[in-house]
Structures are given as structure tokens and as C-alpha cells.
Amino acid sequence: MAKKLHNWTWKEIEEIHEHPHILGHLVGKDKLTELHSKWIRYIWSEGKEKALQAFRGSYKTTAIAEIGATEWLLFNPNDRIFFIRKTFTDALQVVQTIANMMETDEIKELFEFVHGTYPFGSKNTYVRRKEKIEFSFKKTITPEGSLNPFGLDTGITGKHGDFILLDDFVDLNDRVSHAMRERTKDIVREIATNIIDPGKPVRYIGTPWHKQDAWEICPKPLKFNVYDCGLLTEEEIESKRKSTTPSLFAANYELEHVASDDALFKDPVWGEWKYSGIEEPVAHLDAAFDGDHYCALSIAARRHDGKIQVVGFTYAGNVKKWINDGTISSLLKRYNCKKIYNESNPDKGYVGDSLKTLSGIIVKPYQEEMKKHIKISTYLFEVWKDLVFSENTDGEYMNQILDWREGQEPDDSVDGLASLARACFTKRKAYHSERWNW
């Protein structure tokens, strides 16, 4: 028999129960602190429904979901734990991470000491499939396994669990879509009502995104903002602030909501991108090379009903990589777009020249002479009521539009879409000089 790495004692087991972040250190998650143990103990303790909000990047999923579940099963081996996240893929990632931790020597020996068996015994004593994982120390026979991943995008009706953890069930899509916010609320209500066994706890963890998102129907959460935790340096906090719009920084890092009464662009209309019954699609590329700016690609087409359909994408990196890796060309091809505009001021025409190498693409470079806030508040505002955004538009793209105020950054998507509106969709487009090559 192989020599054990560690001879566990009950005193050490009691210490893990009091300070569960120690389990994280055993598997290399050494950024977890005593604060994370406090979160784990709060969420996984007995009692009524509980909720906890912590800023983005605070290791709340690592601590509460992954380490918390591992520690819980050490003392509650027969429980059925449900992990419910925005998508099934997200939830499955958590379950697979826990399963991988269970296969490390340190954790295997810990469970063998407590339960007399390794988490994964012989092939006949456990089930490990995509839809669930059942450990060998679970002695009850149930349709559900020890670990069960679900997404808000998958069916949960008819399932029953002992401990349900909703983790990051609200995201950027809820921020930019009223319909998504209402759908998330409906599913959260269903979960809290119908899939939990009587007397068993439902727990909620994550980050807020909108003042009317699903957090408003959850228990009042404990809150840990970016300043409270000491997990980020002042320099790191400032870096997050510079790369995030003020209202989103307030929501995700300060856990507060900024009033949006002064927002110029509100309540975007969403719909399916139509490939027929439209005029020829056109695009605009707002390029970034370094710093805190994003690349933004806007594609739009006027429909025969007069509406303007839009799909947008952002990239937090150098535009050269975005062009060279084929992303832009594939998106233009996907939406049957053969004409693209780009501003030539910042790079002396480099981006335009690079785009000209794309097969079948007509590049329309121009020199920008208008103040940004005037362009956005005039041309984009004029067409706003006619825009229908494809649901394939990425959240960061829309977030920059909805959060836009004069002088606020990042503003790359709203600037790019305003330029495209000016070029192709507003009544004022004839105003521009021919040398702008519109």
C-alpha cells in the first residue's frame, strides 16, 4: 500500500470545519483567506434562505461553491447539492472542478479518514456523467447525484435537492435586457418554490448588475464591496475603474446602483437578425491599440419595414490581433456584410489597409472632425427609436451604449455606432463632405 501523504486527525478536521478555506490551500487555491471562510460558513450554515454579494473577482465561486461544497460533503455525505448558474456550461465547470479536487491525494485521504472510502471508489460505486456526479460515500439511492449542475437555460422542473446554490444567476445580459431580467426572475421564483425539499436551504451568491434584476426578489444579502475585502490593491482597483463604465463599476465592485435618469439611451429593442427583407448590411470598426479602450465592430442593415437592425461586438485588445486572427472577417461574412467604415486619424490608415486585404470587403476610410459627444447625441440619438438589436450583440457593447454620458469612457461601441448611423442611416448624412468618402 502506498504511503499516505498525511495522517489526518479529528482535531485537524475540526479546524477545517472552522476555517474551510484551508481546504483551498490543500489544492493550490492559496489566494483564499479567512474572509472566504466567513463567507463559506455563512452560506453553508443551517437556517433560513441566505444571500451574499461580493465584488467581481473576489473568488466567491471558488470559495463558496467549490470549497464550500467539498467541506459540506465531508460532514453531510448523503446530500444532493444543486449548482445553478446562468448557463449549464457554467454550472458544469464548477462540478468538474470539485470532482478534480476530489481526485487529489490530499482530499482523497481526507475523505477516506472521515468516511472510510475515497470519493471515487471502484467503477461500480460511483457515477460520473455530465448531468451529475455521485460519490462513493453517498449511501442513499436517489435520482439526483451528490453534485448536480443546472443552468437557467436548462430544465430543472421535477428535480429535488437538499442544498441549492444559485451562483452568478444574474449577469451582463440582465443589465442590458428587460426581457432577460424578467425571465431570470421567473426562473428564480420557480427554483425557490418547486425544486427544494421542505425545510432545506436555498442560497444566493453573486454580483448585482441592474437595480431591477433578480436580486430584488432574493433575501437581503450580506455585501462585501471592493474596498471592504482587502483582496485588491489600490492600483488594481483603479485599473478596474478605468476599464469599466462608472455605473457598471458601481454595481459590480461597489455593489451600488447609480441612477440612470440622465441616460440618453434607454430600453433598447431586441429582435432576431433578419437575412432577408433588408438592404445591404454595412459595418464600422472602432479600432483600439492599447490602454483601456475596446475595439468595437458595429454591423447594421435597414429593414424594409424602416427599422435598422444592429449587431455589435467588442474586443479588449489590440485591433491587429482581432483582424489577424480572422474574427472580423468571419463576422462580416456571417452577416453578409461587404462594406466597412473606419476612422483613419489614429493610425494613418493602417487599419484600413489591413481591412483591404480581406476578401470581397470594400473599405471606406474617413477623417474624423466632429466632437464625439456631439456626434453621439445627434446622430445616434436620431435613429435610436428605429434600432433593433440582435440578441447576438455582446453585453459589453450594449453596456457602453446604455451607460454613455459625455466624457465617459469606455465609449468605443457607442462612438462607432454613432459614426455608422451618421454615415448611412440619418437624414443629415448628405451634410458630410465628399472627401470623407461616405
Image (cartoon, grey):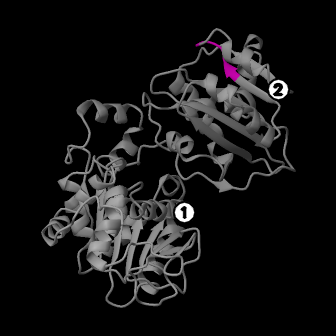
**251 vs 425, nearest the viewer:** 251
Image vertical order of residue 75 relative to residue 251, above or below? below
**194 vs 14, nearest the viewer:** 14
Occupied quadrant, residue 192: bottom left
Label number found at residue 361 = 2
- Majority SS type along the magenta span: loop
Q: Is residue 128 rendered magenta in the image?
A: no
Q: Which tag is nearer the camera, tag 2 or tag 1?
A: 1
Q: In 3D space, how far apart are the residues under numbered discs 2 and 1 (Cα atoms)?
A: 36 Å
Q: Which of the image's four quarters has the C terminus?
A: top right
Q: What residue is drawn where x is 65% and y is 34%?
A: 297
Q: What residue is drawn where x is 69% and y is 35%?
A: 327
Secondary structure beneath label 2: loop
Q: What residue is drawn where x is 62% and y is 26%?
A: 321
Q: Is residue 343 rendered magenta in the image?
A: yes
Image location of residue 405, percent across then percent down: 44, 35
Image vertical order of residue 200 relative to residue 71, above or below? below
**102 vs 353, nearest the viewer:** 102
Image vertical order of residue 205 relative to residue 375, above or below? below
Image location of residue 65, percent across then percent down: 36, 64
Q: Which of the image's four quarters has the N terminus?
A: bottom left
Occupied quadrant, residue 154: bottom right
Amino acid on which disc 2 is placed: Ile
Label number found at residue 87 = 1
**317 vs 265, nearest the viewer:** 317
The answer to whether the residue labelled 2 contacts the one labelled 1, judged by CB atoms less than 8 Å apart, is no
Highlighted magenta segment, given as a residue range: 342-346
